[in-house]
Amino acid sequence: MRSLILIAVYLSKDISKRWLETPGAVLARVSIAISLCLLFLLMQAGFILAEHAIERKIESFGINSMILRTSPPGSGALRPELSTLFEPLAEEGLYFPFSSLFSLAELSNGEKVRVVVYGEDALPALSEMIDGFDQLQADAFLLAYGYPESLIERVRLGDNFFDSVVVYPPPVLRFVTLSKPVLFIPASKFHAIGQKGMQESLFYVSDEPGKLEQVIESMEAVLEEEGFQRYNLTSPVQWVGELKELKQTRIKAQALGGAFVGLLVILIFGSIAVFEYRQNIFATALFKSFGLSSFHLAVRYLMESLLLLGLAFYCAIELAELIHEFVFALAGFDSELVTLAFVNPYLLSDQRVLLGILGVAGFVSVLPVFLGLCKPVGKSLG
């Protein structure tokens, strides 16, 4: 036991002495390993943030919701209205048909807002979504954040003015409002002012989880049959598939990126290890003649490699945390999403893949040295 301790102390001193004699080689290995680890960590963090962004969108809009928008028919084309075509959906969930006006309305402060026109077939849905909707006493209502609720806001639409009451937007309508002020006008008052140019739309929330995907497939088939050539159907159900594909892509990227990192570590660390071994081959032969086994010398090279890789890994983690917010804010991610308090992709428990790659690469990089140490002293010197 005492001899093993003495061997470990001696080999540790030998490692530190070599580092002091060749600081350039040490710095090169550590710097390259830090760069490779940092690239891998940032790549992995980018995928994780993208996955969280999609998950937030799904949670925000609701997994069972969808919105359908269609373009106006061409001249002379006849097709049924959306509100009539999909009216049976009202029995299976929240059914809100509406039309989006192409022109914008103007608030008293000069802000431009989108305009939604709704008919009588949308009243049940509005009554369900908005508390006290039946008691609203105004020509129209404005769904908006940041305004005192029940405030009467004067709104201009073309040459016409509306007194609209401010209503706090219900979360279920985020797909329609997109978190921006929207003016809702009943169709009876809208037709009276003679405005034209609308896009038919339909918002639907299924009562049964998991059924919406089938509903979407059926709606697309009906739209094709009825001659709706241009339409946009959006649902978080589609984002679920996108999320799965993104996770699969992340696994593939980790594999390719890990192979790239591992290969470069093997080439660089292996080349330097072989160079140092050949440079000190006479000292190594002398150690072996004094009774130091090849196994002890091999462990010395392996421990040196793993120590340098461990140092590079730690520095890469610290550097990644330091530049994380700047890098991903610059990449266009939401400011709340890029904070490490929201999600920290650099936790040690999440780095098993990178640690495994570095461990395997560190071992493989010193295999040529192991083979050289297995040779008899005479052949090594020859």
Image (spheres, grey):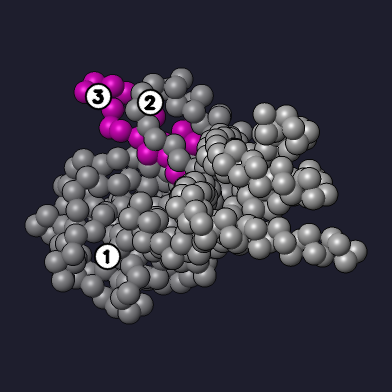
Q: Position of residue 131 (x, y in %)?
A: 48, 70
The local crowd at label 2, few if under 14, some if 14 to 19, many if 20 or more residues have their Cα within 10 Å, is some
Q: CA distance from mark 1 to mark 3?
A: 32 Å
Residue sitting farthest toward the right: 1
Q: CA distance from mark 2 to mark 1?
A: 33 Å
Taking the spot 71% from the left edge, 42% from the top edge, the residue there is 285
Q: Secondary structure at mark 1?
A: loop
The local crowd at label 3, few if under 14, some if 14 to 19, many if 20 or more residues have their Cα within 10 Å, is few
Q: Nearer the viewer, residue 153 or 136?
A: 153
Earlier residue among tags 2 and 1: 1
Number of numbered discs: 3
Taking the spot 44% from the left edge, 22% from the top edge, the residue there is 224
Instruction: Provide the residue designation for mark 1.
Output: 139
Question: Which range of residues does the magenta coloring cover?
Answer: 65-86
- State which mark lies toward you, 1 or 3: 3
Q: CA distance from mark 2 to mark 3?
A: 10 Å
Taking the spot 70% from the left edge, 33% from the top edge, the residue there is 380
Query: Image quadrant of residue 169?
Result: bottom left
Identify whether 75 is placed above or below 175: above
Q: Is residue 67 magenta?
A: yes
Residue sitting farthest toward the left: 159
Instruction: Provide the residue designation for mark 3.
Output: 74
Q: Quadrant of the N terminus?
A: bottom right
Instruction: Provide the residue designation for mark 2.
Output: 228
